[in-house]
Amino acid sequence: MPTLDTRVPAVLMRLDQNPFHHGTLGAVRSLGRAGIEVHAVVEAAPGPVGHSRYLRRTHPRPDGCRDLADVQRLLTGVSDRLGTPAVLIPMDDLSAITVGQLQSRLTGRYLLPEQPSGLPERVADKAELVGICRELGIPHPRTVIPGCASEAAAAASALGLPVVAKWSRPWLLPEAAGLRSTVLVRSADEARELYGRTAEAGSGLLLQEFLPHGRGLDWFFHGYSGAGGECLVGAAGRKERSWPVGAGLTAVGTWLPNPAVERTARHLVSALGYRGILDLDFRRDTATGAYHLLDFNPRPGAQFRLFTDRSGTDVVRALHLDLTGRAVPAQAAVHGRTFVVENYALLSALSVLPSGRARGAAHGDGDGNGDGHPGAADRSVEAAWFALDDPLPAYAMAVAWGLHAARRGRRGLGRVFGGMATDRRRGDFGPHDPALPRTTPVLRRGRSPAGTAQGVPVAHRSG
């Protein structure tokens, strides 16, 4: 295992409100096990990550801390307490964009990749990514950016329903608005109504061709690009299960070779001059066999620990090694290695739709391009939460997750019984209101009492 410079601490920052972000725990463990002093700037409320034996200290982030000046003051305060420069690692898109904007003001306090100005924000912007893919010849779903509600309705019909609707800059979505970053729209009227919330969303609406999901079609690439402009480490993985089912966070993933995905990712990084950690999402089009780039996340993916090679190096360790002047060893692949997010894997296993299983059986596993396990595959499995050397976060997560589920269940029952009482008063005992909670995160057409967006969530990423 390469020796990291233990004199240089690491500060993980997450501006997203997500106490169940297992990627943050993975970074704490990865660096902490190597002897690095790890600090975390996260939400003020204590979460499971705070129970890790490898976390030196949590620096609570005030709720709503998104203004550049506020974030700069927060990071300056952390730096003052450390008394020495530290490697700063953003763990979500908003943090990566904010750190990119503050890069010149953090010099001398934090070690950061020399990222081209504005690039994290550009690649995270869904509309900008469309232009990047078009310019570089990278496959991307057909996309329309409507200029009015009527254009949105027409585009939805022209692309072929259902269509995927995305907000261009999802990090600007107000937390109280109930809007999802990505939804599946099933009618022209839904597209028209969703466009009507553009001002509330804070960025433009995109409508994209829907590429059906199925077994073996969803892939991701994680890498770290150094000052030389090449990926010092980088690998492809296949999403075996997701939550929500079909297009959400990776619940189970496997490290497998995929030359097409790897070539596209390295070409993209080189062409953009991107520096730092990246997480890309792809989906294979069964009609053409092409891998379409869906998302570019300028930070570690939540499942980055999947790509821990035989020397123990992952993208987080590669970043620390490179920024502290240490050599990053050549990557020793561990194809077949599996990463499991226990809570999401359980939900996914309980909620697999029969139609999804049928599609998986129809498509099969192989396309002749790295979709099958190699003969000498490694069978090691890493869990996102539980670790023998650091068990407390898993127990804390289980308790907090159970309480969270119970609260959601009570709210759901309240809405159900409230709706039943209303139906009785009206003499209506027909089907339940489609806006009421369901057993899975799939939403039918309709608006919730909180005013959430219409449609079916297809890729609400926070990790």
Image (cartoon, grey):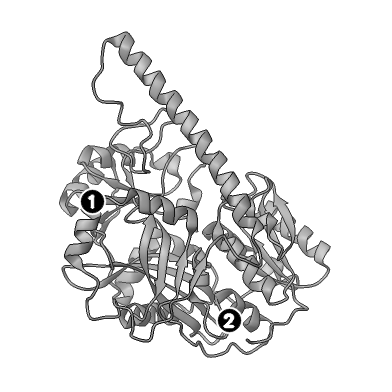
Q: In this view, does 412 lie above or below 440?
A: above
Q: Residue 277 carries which label?
A: none
Q: Between disc 1 and disc 2, whose residue precedes?
A: 2
Q: Does residue 110 appear left or right of residue 173 in this picture?
A: right
Front-most of 335 and 93? 335
Residue drawn 28% across and 36% down? 445
Residue 339 in the image, given as x and y percentages of width and height: 47, 68
Q: Position of residue 202 (x, y in %)?
A: 46, 45
* Contact between labelled residues 2 and 1, with CB atoms less than 8 Å apart: no
What's the residue at 71%, 63% (across, down)?
53
Residue at numbered disc 1: 354
Is residue 153 or residue 309 the one in the foreground?
Answer: 309
Instruction: State the residue position of label 2.
Output: 312
Inter-mark Cα distance, 1 to 2: 39 Å
Please indicate whether residue 90 sits to the left or right of residue 157 in the image. Answer: right
SS at badge 2: loop
Mark 2: few/some/many CA within 10 Å (<14, 14-19, 20+): some
Give the residue type that dot 1 points to.
Answer: Pro
Which residue occupies 58% across, 66% down?
26
Mark 1 vs mark 2: give the one in front: 1
User: What is the x, y in percent for residue 377?
Assistant: 39, 82
Amino acid at dot 2: Gly
Task: Report if residue 293 is visible in the image.
Answer: yes
Q: Tag 1, which secondary structure?
A: helix
- For the N terminus, the quadrant is bottom right
